[in-house]
Structure formats: structure tokens, C-alpha cells
Amino acid sequence: MSGADDLVVLEKDLIAEIDGAGDLTALDAVRVSALGKKGRVSELMSKLGSLPPEERKTFGQTVNALKGKISDALDARKAALETAALDERLKTERADVTLPVRLGPVAEGRIHPVSQVLDEVVEIFADMGFSVAEGTDIETDEMNFDKLNIPPEHPARQDHDTFYFAPKPDGSRLLLRTHTSPVQIRTMVSQKPPIRIIAPGRVYRCDSDQTHTPMFHQVEGLVIDESTHMGHLKWVLQEFCKAFFEVDEVKMRFRASHFPFTEPSMEVDIGAEAIGKPGQWLEILGCGMVHPNVLRNCGLDPEKYQGFAFGVGLDRLTMLKYGIPDLRAFFSGDLTWLSHYGFSTLDVPTLAGGLSS
Ligand code: PHE
């Protein structure tokens, strides 16, 4: 096959084969049979040597041109087949990007209601300019009681049902803190006013029934500066309750009370209509103006500094907001309970996005 006519026939044949290739595999077979080492076009080149010298140049050029055309035709067909294959896939593999994300195992995990409420509380107070402080679960008598104006013989100590560790050789005893109030002391001795902190954490009392567990959670609040007064305390607690219960108005009652570390002291009840129990009052926290003795114990001059403190029961708040009747279930590690009352790991509470939704 060396005549010009044969080349025309070969070109026609190859183009027809290329156009007829139904998929990429068939097309590749055509490529190999045309341009492969032993292919029909390549073989023509090997004939070049046997031609008389005056024909070699034109023949060579013609074969090269043919090679170019076939190669272009192969590329074009390949692109067309690939596009068609992609279109076919897109038809069957349609993705609706508006569908919710498939969660898989992540959806199985649950945030414990107390952790959820803690995150909500932190979010609310952070928005009011408070930062989060921490203490330790194991405390000294001094931090848990003495510095908080509760000396050894003080009757308030008996109310605390304290878990003590075995006494040390020097007679001193460590204990599991009975409230988060020692974090007030830790903060005031290590930080200069103005102070604005909340301190969430575990606390322990030797007590157990439907509404008491030996370990529970509190959030302490402390504000110290030169001018903070009870009006500020009231406002902060009102704003907190509205934000926490996600309602526009909360009825609150400030009742005179007594704590050795605050003067005056109050307990706060909320009108339970906020949580669908009209006519009832529920106690949620203790608070007051920090006692001058406590300020003095921390090296602060009560003539210069003043402020308020509060202590909220987190578990209590959780039961109220999410309608959970039995406190003991919080700590029983029951997965069925957790999957019912727990929260999605992906729903981070924010004021902007809604705390509980
Ligand atoms: N520590 C108190 C308690 O556990 C609560 C409290 C904190 C009261 C701060 C006043 C100020 O009951």
C-alpha cells in the first residue's frame, strides 16, 4: 500500500472506525491498530526506506499528515466520549445539595443536659463580659470555709455535710469542696479588681435523695470593683434568667436570706410560669454583696472595693428548663435516658443562633 489512493482509503476507513468507536476501550483499540508500533499508519512509515529517493519526501509528508489527522480525530472522539460518559453519570448521580448533611456515627453521640446547660450559661455570661475561672475539687478548710467568713465553730459548717479526707500529721484536713465559692477567694487573691468571673464546677455534699446527689454542679459568679451595687446584681440576674429561659419576661422574687460570705444576702425564686407551672415559685440561686470580711481576707480594702457574688445550682436549672423530673438520673449513665434528654454534638449553643434549638 503505497499509492496516494490507498492512503485516502485508509484515512476514510480509520476515520469511520474512530467515529464508530462506542466507548473509550473501543477507541483505544482503534488507536493501537492505527498509530501503535505495528499499526497501519506506522507500518507505512517503515516502507519509506524501500521507496526511490525522489518519492520519499512527499510520501513521508503525506503519511505524517495522515498521522496528524488520525491523531486529531482520535482526540476529538475521546473528548466526545468522555463528555457523553460524564453526562450519563451526572444523570444517574444527581446530588441534591440542599439536603441535610448525613451525620453517620456523629449523630449517635449526645451532649449531657448538664453540659448543654453549662455551655448555655457560659455563653450568656460571656456576652455580659464575664470570663470563666476554675478552682479545684479538692480544697482546704481555709478556702472552703475560713476565708469565706465561716470559722470552725460557725453553725453554717454543719449545713454543708462535708466529705473530709483523713487528717494529715499536722491535723489539717483536705475536703471535697461543698460549693464553688472558694473560687471567689482564689480569684480575689490572684487577680486585681475589676473582677468579673463565673466559675462553673462540681461540688460535693454528703446527701442523697430525689432532689439531692452527693455530687452536683454549681456556677459561682463574682463581680468586684469600686462601684458595683445591688442594682447591678439584680439586673445581671434578671438578664441571665430571661436569656437562659429564652423568654421576654421572667417573674423573679428576691428573698432576704443568710450566707456568712455575703451581706446582705438573698435567695432568688423564679415564677414558674416561665416553665409552664403558673402560680409556683422555684428557688434557683443564692446571692448577695460580698461581705467586707471576705474582701479583707483576700487582701482587698472594703472601704475601696465592693461587689456581688451568686451561686446557681446548675442541675436545678437543667431540670427546670428541660423538664427533667429526677436528679439521680443525671448521674446514672443510662444511655436510653441520655438519647432522650441529650443534645446533638453539632448544636453548639449561641445567643445569635438560639441557645437550645
Ligand atoms: N455558696 C452558696 C451555696 O452553696 C451559694 C452562694 C454563692 C450564695 C455566692 C451567695 C453568694 O449555697
Image (tube, grey):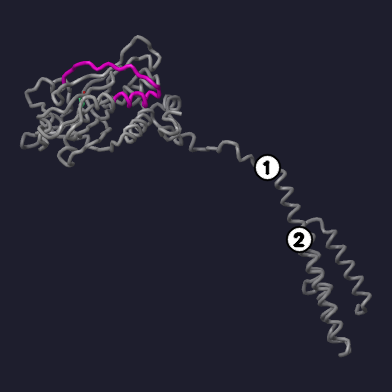
The residue carrying mark 2 is 78
Q: What segment is highlighted magenta in the picture?
A: 237-258
Q: Looking at the picture, how far across and down is residue 195, in whole percent? A: 21, 37
Q: Residue furthest bottom?
A: 53
Q: Is residue 264 visible?
A: yes
Tell me the kind of residue under disc 2.
Answer: Lys
Q: Quadrant of residue 139?
A: top left
Q: Residue furthest top?
A: 279
Kindly identify which numbered label has been placed on residue 94. Answer: 1
**Is the residue under label 1 in contact with that under label 2 (CB below 8 Å)?**
no
Q: Quadrant of residue 54?
A: bottom right
Say whether residue 255 is magenta: yes
Whether residue 93 is situated above or below residue 203 in the rendered picture: below
- Horizontal relation, residue 36 to residue 52: left or right: left
Q: CA distance from mark 2 to mark 1?
A: 24 Å
Question: For the residue carrying disc 2, how many other residues have a C-alpha within 10 Å: few (<14), some (14-19), or many (20+)?
Answer: some
Taking depth in this image into account, of 325 and 173 the one nearest to the observer is: 325
Q: Residue furthest front?
A: 227
Tell me the kind of residue under disc 1.
Answer: Arg
Give the structural element (helix, strand or loop) at label 2.
helix
Give the structural element (helix, strand or loop) at label 1.
loop
Question: For the residue carrying disc 1, how many other residues have a C-alpha within 10 Å: few (<14), some (14-19), or many (20+)?
Answer: few
Taking depth in this image into account, of 34 and 307 the one nearest to the observer is: 307
- Horizontal relation, residue 153 to residue 261: left or right: left
